[in-house]
Image (tube, rainbow, N blue to C red):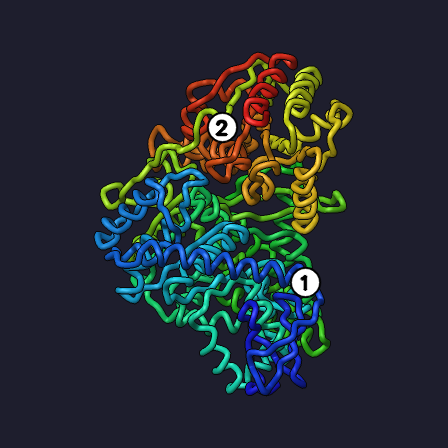
C-alpha cells in the first residue's frame, strides 16, 4: 500500500485509499470517483444514499452551530473557558460547574459534583478543565464506566473541535480495538489479552502489527490524525482500511492527545495503568482526571484488586506441567487442588467459606514438600511462556492456565498478612450445572486502588447523579475532606414531569416472598403497563425475584411484547434484547424485564418513548454471606458506626436510584417511577435516594385500580 495514495473523503473527511481514480469511504458507505484534472470535481456513486445524506446533514448542523457561535461572539471579548464551550447558550447549572472547576483547579483540590442527567454535565466538565490543560500542558483523562458514555464524551469533543484546535481520542480496551481473530475468540480479560497479544507479536503472527513497519505510511497517518478527535469507530476504520493495528495506532496518538476518554481500567487497574502512563509519556502530576458516574468507583476498585482461581484452572495447569515433565510443579499443583477439593467437598453452591491462607499453604507444603514462594511462581510463569510458544507454533491461541495460577498465588502472597483482604473458598455452578470449587482473595477496601491515584494526579473530579451521601464516597475512596470541594446541584427537573410512587403492602424481603405477594406485584405491574402509553422497564432486586414474578403469571397478564434478560445471557444477546425493546417505543410500546445493577439498568439510557415508566421491584441488597459480612466488619472497624451503611445499604440504594433514572436523560423527559417495596417509604432508606426522586414522592396503597388511575392521569396531563 503506497502512502502517496492517501486522500480524504470530501463528505466526512475520513481517510481513503485511492486506486484507479476510485475510492470507497467506509464511514459514508459511498464510492467516490475522482477527476484528477480537477480535484474538486467528484462523482458519488450511490451505494447507500441515506448514509450520505445523514453525513451531509451532520456537516450542515456543525456549520450552523459554528455560525451561531461565531455570530454570537463577534466583537465580544470572550473569557478563556468560553472558547471551549461550543453552544449558543449556557444553563445556570453548567456555568456553576465550570466556575467551580476554574476556581478550584489551581488549588489541586478534589471536586465532587452531584448533578443529574440533562444538565449538560459532560460539556461543562470538559469546558472547565481544558483551558488549564492547554495552558499547563496537562492531559485530561476522562474515565467512564461504559462504551456508551465514552461515545457521549467523543461527541462533545467533536463539537469543541469545531472552534478550538484540540486533539482527543476515545481509547477502549485492547480486545475491543484488536481485529486479530485469535484475541477476539479466546481473550477473556485485560491481562489475558495482553499475554496473547505479546505472544502474537513476538512470533510475528499478527499481520496488523507487522504492517506497522511501513514507517512512511505510519508517519504520514499520525501527522494527519494528531489534530483530530477520534472515537473507537474512527480507529477501527483506520485499522481496517490500512490493515494495521488500531490499538497500536491509538498508542502512538496518545502522545499528542489533549483529552483521552477511556474506561476506569486504564487508570485504576495497576496492570494497565503503568503501561498507559508510559504510552502517554506523562507523569502522575501531568494528568487531570475526570471520573464520570463516580458512584461506581468503590465497587470497581474492589473488583480490580480481588483475584480468584478455580479448580478447573489448577487441573489444566497440572496437565500442562505433566506434559512438560515438570514434576515438582505437578506435585505442588496437585496438593493445592487437593486442599481446595477437600475443603469445598461439603460446601453448597454460592456459600463462602473463610480460610486461613497460611494454614492452607502449610498443608500444601506438607503434602507436596514444596513451599509456595517466588521460586514456584517464577517456575509457573516460565512453564506458561513455554506452553504459549508451543501453541503459537501450532497456530493455536497462546493460552496457559499456569499463568492464571501464578497470578493468583502472587496476589495471595502479597495480601496474605494484610487486613484489607479476606480469603474464601466457594463453589460456583458451571454452565452445565457442575460444581466448580474456587479460591477468592477479596479486597475489602477500595482505597487500596484509589488513594495512590487520587493523591498524585494534578487535579481530579468525581461526578455523578448519585454521589450522596458524600461523606460515604469520600471515606471509601480516600479523599481528605479538607482537600476537597463539594458541589451538589439542585434538581432542575420539574415536579410535573416526574412522578415517584412508593407502593405500600408489598416487598421482596424474605418474609414477603410468597405466591400471594408476587401475584399482587404482577397485578400492580399490569396496572402500570395498561396506563403507560409506550415502553415500561421492570428492574428486579435479583434474578430470583424476576423468576418468581414469571412463575406467578406475569407474562400472562402483560398484553405488550415482553423482552427478558435472563441470567447468564451473553452481552451480545443482552444488547439485542435491549435494542429490540427500545424499538417498540416507536409503536405501541413494550416491556423490559431485567435486574438491578446490570447492563440494562445502569449501562443503557431510555429517553422519551424508549421508557416512560420504570418499576423497581424490591431493594437490591446483596445476598447475606461471609463475603458481605467480612466487608461490613472491616468497614465498621475503619469507620465506626458506618460499616453496615457503607457496605450494605448505600450500594443497594444507589443501584435502585440508578435504575430509576434510566428514563430521564434530559430536562424534557417525562417519567413515572414506581418503587414497588414499602421499605422505600421508610426514612432510613428514603434518605439515601436522590432529591429528584424524593422531591415529589407519594406513598400509594397496593390497589390496582387506584394505581392505574394515578398513572393514567399523569400521562394524560402530558399527552393530551
Q: Is residue 374 left or right of residue 430?
A: left
Whole-percent x, y for residue 36 in the image: 60, 86
Q: Is residue 168 left or right of residue 539?
A: left
Within 10 Å of the Cα at label 1, are there few (<14), some (14-19), or many (20+) other Cα atoms? some
Whole-percent x, y for residue 332 in the image: 60, 60
Q: Residue, x 67% and y 68% (percent of image)?
A: 182
Q: Quadrant of residue 276?
A: bottom left
Q: Residue, x 63% and y 63% (percent of image)?
A: 52
CA gap, disc 2 and disc 1: 39 Å
Closer to us: mark 2 or mark 1?
Answer: 1
Secondary-structure class at tag 1: helix
| Residue 517 appears in view | yes
| Residue 265 appears in view | no
Using the image as rendered, state which of residue 273 and residue 464 is in the foreground: 464
Q: In which quarter of the image is residue 402?
A: bottom right
Q: In this view, does 643 lie above or below 508?
A: below
Placement of the N terminus among the 4 image quadrants: bottom right
Using the image as rendered, state which of residue 587 and residue 486 is in the foreground: 587
Residue designated by label 1? 49
Q: Residue, x 49% and y 17% (percent of image)?
A: 698
Residue designated by label 2? 497
Using the image as rendered, state which of residue 46 and residue 684 is in the foreground: 46
Q: In this view, does 339 lie to the left or right of 158?
A: right
Whole-percent x, y for residue 366 in the image: 56, 55
Amino acid at each position: 500500500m503506497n502512502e502517496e495514495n492517501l486522500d480524504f473523503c470530501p463528505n466526512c473527511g475520513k481517510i481513503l485509499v485511492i486506486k484507479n481514480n476510485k475510492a470507497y469511504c467506509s464511514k459514508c458507505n459511498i464510492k467516490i470517483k475522482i477527476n484528477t484534472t480537477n480535484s474538486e470535481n467528484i462523482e458519488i456513486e450511490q451505494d447507500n444514499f441515506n448514509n450520505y445524506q445523514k453525513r451531509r446533514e451532520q456537516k450542515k448542523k456543525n456549520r450552523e452551530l459554528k455560525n451561531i457561535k461565531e455570530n454570537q461572539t463577534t466583537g465580544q471579548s470572550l473569557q478563556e473557558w468560553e472558547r471551549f464551550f461550543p453552544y449558543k447558550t449556557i444553563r445556570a447549572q453548567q456555568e456553576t460547574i465550570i466556575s467551580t472547576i476554574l476556581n478550584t483547579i489551581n488549588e489541586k483540590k478534589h471536586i465532587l459534583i452531584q448533578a443529574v442527567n440533562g444538565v449538560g454535565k459532560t460539556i461543562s466538565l470538559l469546558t472547565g478543565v481544558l483551558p488549564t490543560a492547554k495552558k499547563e500542558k496537562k492531559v485530561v483523562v476522562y474515565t467512564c464506566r461504559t462504551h456508551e458514555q465514552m461515545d457521549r464524551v467523543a461527541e462533545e469533543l467533536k463539537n469543541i473541535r469545531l472552534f478550538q484546535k484540540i486533539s482527543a481520542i476515545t481509547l477502549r480496551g485492547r480486545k475491543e480495538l484488536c481485529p486479530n481473530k485469535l484475541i477476539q475468540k479466546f481473550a477473556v480479560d485485560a491481562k489475558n489479552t495482553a499475554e496473547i497479544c505479546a505472544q502474537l507479536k513476538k512470533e510475528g503472527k499478527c499481520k496488523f502489527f507487522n504492517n506497522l513497519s511501513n514507517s512512511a505510511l505510519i508517519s504520514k497517518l499520525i501527522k494527519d490524525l494528531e489534530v483530530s478527535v477520534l472515537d473507537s469507530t474512527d480507529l477501527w476504520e483506520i485499522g481496517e482500511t490500512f490493515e494495521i493495528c488500531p490499538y497500536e495506532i491509538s498508542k502512538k496518538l496518545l502522545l499528542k492527545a489533549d483529552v483521552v476518554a477511556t474506561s476506569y481500567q486504564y487508570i485504576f487497574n495497576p496492570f494497565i495503568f503503568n503501561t498507559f502512563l508510559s504510552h502517554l509519556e506523562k507523569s502522575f502530576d501531568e494528568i487531570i482526571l475526570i471520573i464520570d458516574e463516580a458512584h461506581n468507583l468503590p465497587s470497581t476498585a474492589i473488583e480490580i484488586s480481588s483475584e480468584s482461581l478455580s479448580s478447573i484452572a489448577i487441573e489444566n495447569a497440572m496437565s500442562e506441567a505433566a506434559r512438560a515433565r515438570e514434576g515438582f510443579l505437578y506435585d505442588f499443583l496437585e496438593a493445592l487442588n487437593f486442599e481446595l477439593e477437600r475443603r469445598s467437598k461439603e460446601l453448597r453452591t454460592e456459600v463462602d467459606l473463610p480460610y486461613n491462607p497460611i494454614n492452607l499453604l502449610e498443608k500444601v507444603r506438607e503434602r507436596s514438600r514444596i513451599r509456595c514462594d517466588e521460586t514456584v511462581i517464577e517456575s509457573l510463569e516460565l512453564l506458561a511462556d513455554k506452553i504459549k510458544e508451543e501453541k503459537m507454533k501450532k497456530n493455536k491461541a497462546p493460552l496457559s492456565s499456569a499463568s492464571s495460577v501464578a497470578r493468583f498465588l502472587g496476589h495471595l502472597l502479597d495480601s496474605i498478612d494484610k487486613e484489607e483482604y479476606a480469603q474464601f473458598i466457594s463453589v460456583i455452578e458451571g454452565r452445565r450445572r457442575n460444581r466448580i470449587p474456587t479460591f477468592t482473595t477479596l479486597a475489602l477496601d477500595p482505597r487500596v486502588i484509589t488513594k495512590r491515584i487520587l493523591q498524585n494526579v494534578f487535579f481530579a473530579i468525581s461526578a455523578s447523579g448519585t454521589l450522596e451521601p458524600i461523606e460515604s464516597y469520600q471515606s471509601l475512596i480516600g479523599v481528605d475532606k479538607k482537600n476537597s470541594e463539594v458541589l451538589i446541584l439542585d434538581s432542575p427537573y420539574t415536579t410535573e414531569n416526574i412522578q415517584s410512587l412508593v407502593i405500600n403492602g408489598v416487598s421482596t424481603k424474605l418474609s414477603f416472598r410468597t405466591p400471594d405477594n408476587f401475584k399482587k406485584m404482577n397485578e400492580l405491574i399490569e396496572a402500570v403497563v395498561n396506563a403507560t402509553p409506550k415502553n415500561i422497564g421492570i428492574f428486579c432486586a435479583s434474578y430470583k425475584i424476576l423468576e418468581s414474578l414469571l412463575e406467578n403469571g406475569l407474562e400472562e397478564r402483560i398484553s405488550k411484547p415482553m423482552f427478558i434478560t435472563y441470567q447468564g445471557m451473553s452481552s451480545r444477546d443482552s444488547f439485542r434484547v435491549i435494542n429490540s425493546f427500545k424499538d417498540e417505543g416507536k409503536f405501541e410500546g413494550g416491556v423490559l424485564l431485567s435486574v438491578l445493577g446490570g447492563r440494562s439498568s445502569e449501562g443503557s439510557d431510555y429517553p422519551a418513548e424508549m421508557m416512560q415508566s420504570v418499576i423497581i421491584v424490591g431493594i437490591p441488597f446483596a445476598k447475606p454471606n461471609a463475603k458481605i459480612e467480612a466487608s461490613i466488619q472491616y468497614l465498621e472497624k475503619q469507620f465506626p458506626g458506618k460499616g453496615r451503611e457503607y457496605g450494605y445499604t448505600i450500594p443497594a440504594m444507589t443501584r435502585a436510584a440508578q435504575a430509576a433514572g434510566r428514563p430521564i436523560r434530559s430536562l424534557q423527559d417525562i417519567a413515572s417511577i414506581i418503587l414497588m417495596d414499602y421499605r422505600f417509604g421508610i426514612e432510613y432508606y428514603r434518605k439515601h435516594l436522590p432529591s429528584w426522586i424524593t422531591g415529589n414522592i407519594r406513598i400509594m396503597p397496593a390497589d390496582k385500580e387506584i394505581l392505574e388511575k394515578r398513572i393514567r392521569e399523569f400521562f394524560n396531563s402530558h399527552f393530551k
